[in-house]
Image (spheres, grey):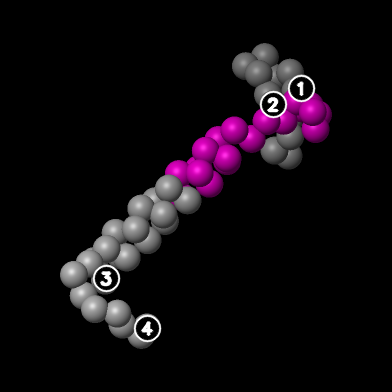
Amino acid sequence: MSSETETTEDGIVREIGHDEFDPVGTLALILIYFVIIGGLWAFMYFVEFLGNGPTVV
């Protein structure tokens, strides 16, 4: 069975067309990952450079 079909309890299969498919969960996960990466980047920036002189990485 492909990911574009939906099965009910009665065994009826309904195909979901391109216009009906709405991957909100995937978008939410991607946004959560970007927030985590951004937060970790900000934390690492302040840990690395807070109170220190200029450094060459």
Q: Which mark is residue 36?
A: none
Q: Which residue is mark 2?
A: 6
Q: Residues within 10 Å of mark 1 (few under 14, many from 20)?
A: few
Which tag is nearer the camera, tag 4 or tag 2?
Answer: 4
Which tag is nearer the camera, tag 1 or tag 3?
Answer: 3
Position of 29 relative to 47 (above/below) = above
Dot 1 falls on a residue whose secondary structure is: strand
The image quadrant that residue 52 belongs to is: bottom left
Q: Which residue is mark 1?
A: 14
Residue segment shown in magenta: 15-33
Is residue 16 a member of the stretch shown in magenta? yes
Q: Earlier in the sequence, mark 3 or mark 4?
A: 3
The image quadrant that residue 12 belongs to is: top right
Q: Which residue is mark 3?
A: 49
**Residue 1 visible:** no
Direction top: furthest residue: 10
Q: Which residue is mark 4?
A: 57
As rendered, which of 1 and 52 lies closer to the eye?
Answer: 52
Circles 1 and 3, Cβ within 8 Å, touching? The answer is no
Q: Position of residue 8 (x, y in %)?
A: 65, 18
Q: Earlier in the sequence, mark 2 or mark 3?
A: 2
Circles 3 and 4, Cβ within 8 Å, touching? The answer is no
Q: Residues within 10 Å of mark 2 (few under 14, many from 20)?
A: few
Q: Position of residue 13 (x, y in %)?
A: 75, 23
Real-space CA distance between mark 2 and mark 1, rounded to the nearest whole angstrom: 5 Å
Circles 4 and 2, Cβ within 8 Å, touching? The answer is no
Q: Amino acid at mark 3?
A: Phe
Real-space CA distance between mark 1 and mark 3, rounded to the nearest whole angstrom: 56 Å
Q: Position of residue 42 (x, y in %)?
A: 34, 58
Dot 3 falls on a residue whose secondary structure is: helix
Q: Amino acid at mark 4?
A: Val
